[in-house]
Image (cartoon, rainbow, N blue to C red):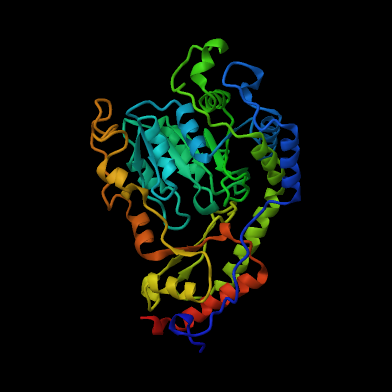
Amino acid sequence: MKKLALNGGAKEVKGKFRPYNPIGVEEAEAAKRVLDSGILSDFLGCWDPRFYGGAKVQEFERACENYFGVPHAVTVNSWTAGLIAAIGAIGIEPGDEVIVPPWTMSATATAILHWNALPVFSDIESNYFCLDIAALEKNITPYTKAIIAVDIFGHSADMDAIMSVASKHGLKVVSDSAQAPGAMYKGRYAGTIANVGGYSLNYHKHIHTGEGGILVTDDEEIANKARLIRNHGEAVVGDMGRSELANMVGYNMRLGEIECAIGIEQLKKLDDFVSRRQAVAQRLTTGLSGLPGLTTPHLIDDCTHVYYVYPMVLQIDAVDASRTTIVDALTAEGIQGVFAGYTNIHLLPMYQRKIAYGTTGFPWNSEFTKRSICYDKGICPVAEELHDKTMFGLDLCRYDLCDDDVDQIIAAFWKVWSGLGLLG
C-alpha cells in the first residue's frame, strides 16, 4: 500500500490543475469591436429608446431568449442585482415572507430583505440538496408570498412539485439558477419554469462576462418591472404613462456593451462547456464507484446536471475516519478544489442577531413584520448535518480538467480509502 501524502508519502496528483478560462479569441475580438466603436454603454435613465440599452445588450438578450426558449431575457450587472430585480418585479411587499433554502449564496436571502420582506429558511433534501417539498409546505404561513428555488451545484430543484405547491397556495416562484445554466429539467431549461429565473455570469460560472446576470421569464409584466428596477424606474414611469408604481425604486443594474459582446460569444459555447464538465463528472462517478461509504451525485429522472460543483456525501458509519480527516488527506494528495460542507446562511450573524438595516432590528421589529421568525440552529436539520459532518465536494467550476487530471483524482481517492484505517 502506498504511503499517504498526509503521512509523508508522495502526492498522487503531480501538478496544478489548469484554471477554467472559457475566454477565447472570439470574445477578445468582440470586446475589441466594442472598444473601437467607443460606445461602452448606451443606456439612458429616462424614457427613450436607449432606456433598454445599446446594440450589444439587445443582441445578447435576444440570443438568451432564443437559447433558453423564453419570450423575455433581461441582462443585469450581477446576479445579486438580478435577484433584487426579480423579487421586486413579482410584487413583494414589506412584511411578506419568502421561503428560501439555507444552501445558497447569501445574496439569495438578502435580496428578500432588500424589499423589507422576511426570508424564511426551509430545509433541503439529501440527494440533490435542493428544497425539500415536505419542509417547504410546513413553512408556508398566511404571510408567505413567494418561494425561491435554488438549483444548487448545477442540478435543478424539483420544479414540478414546487410549482404545484405554489399553485395550491397562490405563491410566486423565483428560480435561482445561478449555478445551473444549460441544465435540463424534464425537457426545459432550469430557470425557465418558475415565474422568473436566471443565471449568474460571474467569473467562475459556466459562462462569464466578469460580472453579470440574466433574468428569464414568460411574463411580460415581470420583465417590464425588472427592466424598470434595473434602470431608474422612478424617473421613467411618468413619461411611460405607467400608473402602477409599486417597487419602482430604480437602480443602475445595467450591463455594459463589452460584457454583452463577450456574453454573446460565450453563449454560443455553452453547450460545449456543459458537455465537457458532464464528461468529467461521469468519469469521476465511474472511477469512484465501489468506494465504501461514498455517495456520488444523484440525478432526478429526465434531468441533467451541469456540475458547478461535484457533490459527494460520506456515510460516516461506513468509513473509519472523519470527513475533516478525509478531506485533509485528499488535499495532501494534491487534489485542488476539494472542500468540506457548503453553507447554512440562516446561521450568519445577520439572522442570528436580526440586524440588517440600522441597529435596531429592522425589518424584523417593524410594525408590519413584528412576529416571530426563527433562525435557530436546528430548523434545517438535513442541511446542518450535511454541512457539519457528511457532505464534501470538488469545485469543478474552477478548473479545466483533462482526462489525466481526473484519473489522478480518482487514484488519489482510492489511495486515501485504502489507508482510511491509518488516518484516525
Q: Residue 420: percent from the left, percent from the top?
A: 42, 81
Horizontally, is 63 left or right of 106 in the view?
A: right
Query: Residue sitting at 68 percent across and 42 percent down?
Result: 262
Q: Residue 272: percent from the left, percent from the top?
A: 70, 53
Give the quarter of the figure containing the C terminus: bottom left
Question: In the image shown, does 302 or 19 lie closer to the viewer?
Answer: 19
Horizontally, is 49 left or right of 245 in the view?
A: right
Horizontally, is 50 left or right of 191 in the view?
A: right
Question: In the image shown, does 313 or 324 lie closer to the viewer?
Answer: 324
* Residue 215 vertical placement versus 181 (above, below): above
Q: Residue 287: percent from the left, percent from the top?
A: 59, 73
Q: Residue 250: percent from the left, percent from the top?
A: 48, 24
Total labels drawn: 0
* Residue 44 vertical placement versus 31 (above, below): above
Which residue is most to the bottom?
A: 1
* Residue 63 vertical placement versus 24 (above, below): above
Q: In which quarter of the image is residue 40?
A: top right
Query: Residue sitting at 28 percent across and 39 percent down?
Result: 355
Q: In which quarter of the image is residue 119?
A: top left
